[in-house]
């Protein structure tokens, strides 16, 4: 488990010694937390005093909340400015249930987590659909309303005097306190919760959920094409984040035994955000470091009194301009740069490399000769423009079907309808024998439609291996909690997917680049990776949008071999392409579009000789020998 | 239907000399992240010349045009326009210096009227020489009478051909010395093209230098003096258009066949 | 009946404020596809700077326009310094965080330097309420809808009749194409933030005499303006105007018939529900996302 590293190698290779140094850091951190209350026994002094102990406990509480915020900001790329209010919701839930309903501590805590999590989901779902930034606006609003309610609903919350006399928490009759007499048991409850939060963060980062969150943040389109419900995964991210905020809040209420609204202001939300960014959003150790540094600094900044908030603002600006990756992110980069010296040259493998294992992985296509895809009178209009006009075509299973036509003929639009990105204005699509209305891309992906993009859309900051693993997303069966707990059947599944992803990398010859950040790959390799990622879906229908654009001749030949090989193994492929030579070499059938309409359809040689096609491409008066 | 007339005479062929080139591009490279779209291109357009640039889709033509016109910054290489280095200059500065581009996909301001689109075309001129800008509007509208009929219509409601006319007219209104046209034929019917190409030839006869990027090779070869053939981010060869029209290498490049 | 007229009038007044702030968001968004998240602080500066200038002895007629102008310049400076450097990538987090940070700094600096308590912004129109159909209202409050109408016509004239306004629409529609006709899109964006600043600061200045000037006066109103713009569909100016006014009126009716304390809770809940039903906003068109 690497604590200071990015969820997976920060652009560099996972070197074992770094991994172990992270482990040592984590062990030291745990040890320090465990021994802290007893420090006085070692140095023979009255340390920590109950005040100092309380400071550390509060820091750990904040740490839990910041871990949650890091999952939201660092993984899912969303920002909440109502996080303090969610903490307040947890705190008030715990306090009120203990005070008014005499609920036991653990039950109170369960609600303290569940209520904010549910609230988070309710806020996220309507807002992340259009623009992630709307979530931020709504969370600010939520924070204000929440504060408003606390202040005004005096009969429930006590208004300014708050809720006092919260009973001391107990577990199994044991009173939880941070005193030596009680062996500091409440201190350890909080410490345990912090470790739990860190575990959740780590388990998420190393699972399909965390990968899906990061994927959705990097390229919404590619994530959808790989079967990820972007709205769903973002809602989940905010629910988890809000749940951890509530956990911190519940623990806080039981520590202070008093809550009122003054703790959960907008400025506290900003503070939490500064901690996240300062530590290094998206890193695993960032929340701990950011919280510790800013919390310690906060004790000093208090001297500034009314300028304290100003200082937080200034700090945030400085971090964003000077160190956008935060403390841990910047250190990780530095380490990667130092480590890269003397790095071995990576070998690019030959491809395609149809290993024995691959055929077993390839999804079972339908019976040969059946129609994988039928479109009938498919039409797509944007405003006044008709991009696709009454297209009727049939794609037989196990064939390579090329879609060609001059620029702007509607090929990509047609591909986007078939993959669910555009909703057709009229007409019908029958896929795998089933007539479908408009389906979202992620639903079609789950049915076995994979695609590549004209301008490769990789998850640039994720590693090559992780990119392929995102492609496996839809095929996991282990549920959310099994994943978080890393139960044996999840672990088995994860191992199997990992093996499969590595196999796919070998198929496209990128094994040596597995730990490289995808954006650092040369262009040709990026195309290979995009195809490997699409194959990870085990698609029945693969849509390739100009896969040869920008490739060298050699690379195109390899691509032809790959496409042919896939079709021979039963996969159906629709290919939008301009390279005529490639189309002739690889396709079984060609449909030609011009101005959104089908102008020719047939075997490659027939189409090549069709005068209408030649005219569409070269203009009339083209030399006759083109046809030859 | 006949292919558009070739500009009479061959005085344009091979005309540009290094010292008098209006536009001179040397060693130009354009990349998107790690993707190299243009890999070291040299190209020249002489004053008064009508030059074509052809090649299959994805050859890097549009990226090259965008780098020349300042829409994006080249990764390496040099662009000189009108005797001065203009590498990396933003597009609005290139327009002010006399290089206008009609972008791929036309990009008319669809939510504004034809009249307002034309007005925006005169953006630089209206500040310098308002009277001249008005006269220029008349001159340009005379070239495209169809636009005059639709002055108050929203540009988004025009047909594709009319939008292309508007895009060209808009480009002309900045009174450029060099007009770059990216993919004139995109999505347009042959009938429309038969109307547009002669207009370009006429403009060129009147002294405007034109760099035409075109996928429809036969059109480009028919109207231009000289043509560059591009593939995979590089210029493969160039020559007088009349000669290239019968050069098998052109079709090879087009069909993605390896140039031997 | 009197109560209804009262709610309508005060609602129209406060709604005009939301509409003007919302229009500020519209102007910024259309030009830059980014906004100053803490735009409420520009609104606040409009009122606070006016008080400061009055303190320094400036006459009201000088202090008022000077305050609005200065606040608008701050708005433009925020675009240049904190939005533009972060608006190159598709990810919205950068400029969102920087503008929030700057807003926090502005607000806390104002608290420290100006006053932590609200201060009166004197106006001859806010001294004696007048009676209209049985309802009592300050003439100052009636000034707001008038100002909104003027602003709306002003914007309409600017966007449709001036070359610069057309250029701004061109930038909003397609930055690349705007550059290709010779428009400096960056400068137009700067101007857009300045104009938005004028709108926001004007709203703050005009409502200042009614709600008093304070460092915190902008936070909630800025947020409501933003929400109103989102609910309307941020790219539709008329929608923003209508939604702003309606929201103001609705607020007053909620205050009158339900509860003052629960006003914002009900209002915000309503907005979240509307967003649930109309993801693109009430007047927004589904955006066409190119794949």
Image (cartoon, coloured by chain):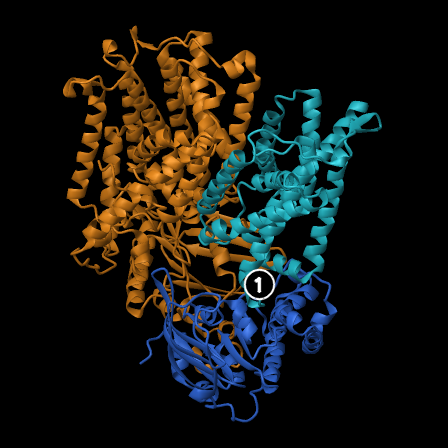
**Image position of A324 with respect to B83: above or below:** above
Q: Position of residue B71 (x, y in %)?
A: 49, 66
Residue situated in front as seen by the camera: A550 or C220:
C220
> Residue A579: which quarter of the image?
bottom left
Q: Position of residue A373 (x, y in %)?
A: 45, 51
**Image position of A318 with respect to A531: above or below:** above
Q: Position of residue A145 (x, y in %)?
A: 55, 26
Residue furthest front in the image: C57
Q: Is residue A225 left or right of residue C120?
A: left
**Image position of A618 with respect to C219: above or below:** below
Counting other residues with Cα less than 10 Å from the Cα at mark 1, is it few (<14), some (14-19), or many (20 or more)? Answer: many
Q: Which chain is blue?
A: B
Mark 1 sits on what residue? C178
User: What element does badge 1 sit on?
Assistant: helix
Q: Which chain is cyan?
A: C
* Residue at x 55%, y 21% (from the top left corner): A149
Indicate the quadrant containing the N terminus of chain A: top left, top right, bottom left or bottom right. top left
> Residue C45: which quarter of the image?
top right
Q: Which colour represents chain A?
A: orange
Q: In this rendering, does residue A206 appear at all? A: yes
Q: In this rendering, does residue A628 appear at all? A: no
Residue situated in front as seen by the camera: A342 or A304:
A304
């Amino acid at each position: 488990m690497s604590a200071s590293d990015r969820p997976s190698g920060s652009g560099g290779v996972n070197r074992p010694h770094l991994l172990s140094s992270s482990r040592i850091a984590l062990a030291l951190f745990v040890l320090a937390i465990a021994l802290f209350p007893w420090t006085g026994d070692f140095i023979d002094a009255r340390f920590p005093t109950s005040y100092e102990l309380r400071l550390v406990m509060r820091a750990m509480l904040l740490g839990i909340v910041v871990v949650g915020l890091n999952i939201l900001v660092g993984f899912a790329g969303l920002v909440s400015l109502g996080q303090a209010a969610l903490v307040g919701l947890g705190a008030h839930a715990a306090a009120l249930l203990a005070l008014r309903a005499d609920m036991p501590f653990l039950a109170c805590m369960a609600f303290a987590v569940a209520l904010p999590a549910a609230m988070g989901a309710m806020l996220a779902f309507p807002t992340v659909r259009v623009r992630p930034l709307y979530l931020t606006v709504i969370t600010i609003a939520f924070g204000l309303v929440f504060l408003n309610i606390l202040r005004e609903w005096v009969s429930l919350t006590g208004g300014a005097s708050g809720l006092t006399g919260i009973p001391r928490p107990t577990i199994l009759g044991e009173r939880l306190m941070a005193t030596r007499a009680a062996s500091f048991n409440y201190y350890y409850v909080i410490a345990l919760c912090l470790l739990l939060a860190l575990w959740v963060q780590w388990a998420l980062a190393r699972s399909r959920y965390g990968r899906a969150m990061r994927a959705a943040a990097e390229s919404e389109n590619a994530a959808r094409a790989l079967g990820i419900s972007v709205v769903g995964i973002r809602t989940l991210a905010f629910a988890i984040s809000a749940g951890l905020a509530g956990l911190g809040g519940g623990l806080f209420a039981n520590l202070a035994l008093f809550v009122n609204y003054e703790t959960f202001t907008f400025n506290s939300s900003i503070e939490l955000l500064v901690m996240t960014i300062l530590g290094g959003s998206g890193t695993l150790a960032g929340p701990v470091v950011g919280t510790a540094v800013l919390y310690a600094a906060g004790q000093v900044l208090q001297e500034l009194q009314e300028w304290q908030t100003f200082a937080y603002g200034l700090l945030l600006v400085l971090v964003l301009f000077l160190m956008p990756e935060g403390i841990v992110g910047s250190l990780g980069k530095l380490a990667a740069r130092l480590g890269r010296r003397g790095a071995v040259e990576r070998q690019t493998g030959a491809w395609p490399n149809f290993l024995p294992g691959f055929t077993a992985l390839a999804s079972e296509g339908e019976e040969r000769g059946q129609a994988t895809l039928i479109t009938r009178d498919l039409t797509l209009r944007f405003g006044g423009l008709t991009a696709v006009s009454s297209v009727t075509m049939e794609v037989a299973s196990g064939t390579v079907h090329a879609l060609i036509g001059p620029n702007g003929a509607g090929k990509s639009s047609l591909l986007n309808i078939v993959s669910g990105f555009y909703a057709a204005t009229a007409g019908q699509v029958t896929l795998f024998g089933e007539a479908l209305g408009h389906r979202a891309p992620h639903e079609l992906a789950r049915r076995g439609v994979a695609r590549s993009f004209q301008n490769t859309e990789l998850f640039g900051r994720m590693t090559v291996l992780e990119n392929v693993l995102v492609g496996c997303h839809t095929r996991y069966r282990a549920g959310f909690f099994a994943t978080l707990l890393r139960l044996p059947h999840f672990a088995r599944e994860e191992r199997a997917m990992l093996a499969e992803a590595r196999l796919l990398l070998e198929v496209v010859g990128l094994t040596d680049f597995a730990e490289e950040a995808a954006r650092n790959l040369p262009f040709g390799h990026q195309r290979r990776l995009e195809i490997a990622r699409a194959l990870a879906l085990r698609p029945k229908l693969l849509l390739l949008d100009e896969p040869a654009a920008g490739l060298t001749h050699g690379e195109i030949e390899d691509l032809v071999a790959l496409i042919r090989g896939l079709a021979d193994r039963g996969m159906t492929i629709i290919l939008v392409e301009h390279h005529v030579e490639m189309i002739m070499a690889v396709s079984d059938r060609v449909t030609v579009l011009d101005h959104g309409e089908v102008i020719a359809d047939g075997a490659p040689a027939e189409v090549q000789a069709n005068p209408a096609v030649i005219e569409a491409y070269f203009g009339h008066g083209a030399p006759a020998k083109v046809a030859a | 239907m006949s292919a558009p007339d070739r500009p009479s005479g061959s005085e344009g062929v091979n005309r540009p000399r290094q010292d008098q080139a209006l536009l001179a591009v040397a060693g130009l490279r354009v990349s998107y992240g790690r993707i190299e779209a243009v890999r070291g291109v040299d190209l020249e357009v002489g004053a008064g010349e009508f030059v074509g640039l052809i090649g299959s889709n994805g050859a890097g033509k549009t990226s090259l045009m965008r780098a020349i016109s300042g829409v994006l910054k080249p990764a390496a290489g040099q662009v000189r326009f009108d005797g001065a280095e203009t590498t990396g200059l933003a597009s609005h500065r290139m327009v002010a210096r006399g290089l206008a581009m009609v972008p791929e996909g036309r990009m008319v301001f669809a939510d504004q009227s034809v009249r307002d689109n034309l007005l925006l075309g005169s953006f630089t001129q209206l500040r310098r020489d308002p009277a001249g800008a008005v006269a220029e509007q008349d001159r340009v509208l005379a070239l495209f009478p169809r636009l005059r009929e639709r002055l108050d219509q929203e540009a988004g409601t025009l047909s594709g051909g009319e939008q292309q006319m508007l895009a060209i007219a808009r480009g002309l209104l900045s009174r450029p010395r060099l007009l770059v046209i990216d993919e004139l034929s995109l999505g347009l019917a042959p009938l429309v093209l038969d109307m547009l190409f002669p207009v370009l030839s006429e403009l060129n006869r009147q002294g405007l230098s034109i760099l035409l990027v075109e996928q429809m090779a036969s059109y480009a070869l028919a109207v231009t003096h000289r043509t560059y053939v591009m593939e995979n981010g590089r210029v493969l060869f160039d020559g007088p258009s009349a000669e290239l029209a019968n050069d098998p290498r052109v079709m090879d490049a087009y069909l993605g066949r390896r140039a031997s | 009946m009197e109560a209804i007229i009262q709610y309508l009038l005060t609602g129209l007044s406060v709604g005009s404020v939301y509409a003007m702030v919302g229009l500020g968001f519209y102007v910024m968004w259309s030009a830059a596809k980014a906004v100053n998240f803490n735009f409420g602080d520009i609104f606040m500066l409009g009122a606070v700077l006016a008080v400061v200038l009055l303190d320094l002895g400036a006459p009201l007629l000088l202090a008022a326009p000077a305050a609005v102008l200065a606040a608008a310049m701050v708005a433009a400076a925020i675009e240049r310094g904190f939005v533009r450097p972060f608006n190159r990538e598709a990810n919205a987090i950068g400029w969102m965080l920087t503008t929030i940070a700057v807003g926090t700094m502005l607000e806390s600096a104002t608290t420290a330097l100006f006053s932590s308590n609200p201060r009166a912004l004197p106006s001859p129109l806010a001294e004696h309420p007048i009676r209209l159909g049985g309802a009592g209202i300050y003439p100052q409050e009636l000034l707001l809808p008038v100002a909104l109408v003027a602003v709306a016509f002003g914007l309409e004239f600017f966007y449709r009749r001036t070359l610069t306004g057309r250029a701004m629409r061109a930038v909003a529609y397609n930055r690349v194409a705007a550059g290709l006709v010779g428009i400096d899109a960056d400068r137009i964006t700067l101007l857009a933030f300045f104009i938005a600043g004028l709108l926001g600061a004007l709203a703050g200045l005009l409502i200042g005499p009614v709600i008093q000037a304070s460092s915190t006066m902008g936070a909630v109103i800025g947020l409501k303006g933003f929400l109103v713009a989102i609910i309307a569909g941020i790219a539709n100016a008329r929608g923003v105007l209508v939604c702003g006014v309606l929201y103001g009126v609705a607020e007053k009716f909620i205050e009158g018939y339900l509860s003052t304390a629960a006003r914002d809770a009900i209002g915000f809940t309503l907005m979240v529900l509307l967003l649930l039903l109309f993801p693109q906003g009430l007047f927004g068109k589904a955006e066409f996302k190119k794949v």
